Image (cartoon, rainbow, N blue to C red):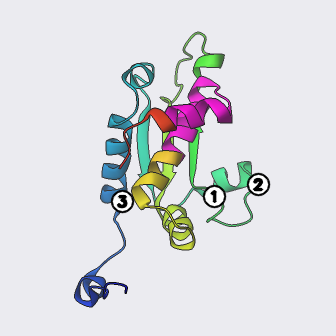
Amino acid sequence: MSAEPDTAALAAAKAPSLAEIEALADAAFAGLPEGFRALCAGVRIVVDDFPDEETLAEMECESEFDLLGLFRGVGLAQAGEVVTGQMPNAVWLYRRPLLDYWAEHDETLGHLVAHVLVHEIGHHFGLSDEDMARIEAAAEIA
């Protein structure tokens, strides 16, 4: 016997805002292993609704929903001398594509945000998919 859905709560529910996705990302980051977080000093987490047109073209996306997140900057594997005018390293999370993906899959939004965050930070380190999976498994993610 399944529980009845809380129709009042569903009727009042709204899609998470940019600030709420950012809070999920901050919580996910805080749950990552301490040594991993320490190496991320200076990496900003930015949440936007969609990638900009330049990013979509650069990444050869067919749709604005194709990209869930992106690392921009100089990864540790390529780190060298800082160039004047260089933008700080940042992980971009895209709210609308994340919500679209979430609606189509059976996982929590918190887990999805954490997964994309770990994957994009992994680019900062030059990690393999296997390395990222180990870090994600060690994380304390809701």
Q: Earlier in the sequence, mark 3 or mark 2?
A: 3
Residue that numbered label 1 is attached to: 53
Residue 131 part of the magenta segment: yes
Q: Position of residue 141 (x, y in %)?
A: 38, 44
- From the viewer's side, name the closer residue of 94 and 104: 104
Q: Give the amino acid at mark 3.
A: Leu
* Farthest front residue in view: 1
Q: Give the amino acid at mark 1.
A: Glu
Q: Give the amino acid at mark 2.
A: Glu
Q: Position of residue 142 (x, y in %)?
A: 35, 50
Q: Residues within 10 Å of mark 3 (few under 14, many from 20)?
A: some
Q: Residues within 10 Å of mark 2 (few under 14, many from 20)?
A: few
Residue that numbered label 2 is attached to: 60
Give the left or right position of residue 69, taking residue 30 as reference. right
The Cα–Cα distance between marks 2 and 1, rounded to whole angstroms, is 10 Å
| Residue 18 - label | 3
Q: Is residue 82 above or below residue 91?
A: above
The Cα–Cα distance between marks 3 and 2, rounded to whole angstroms, is 25 Å
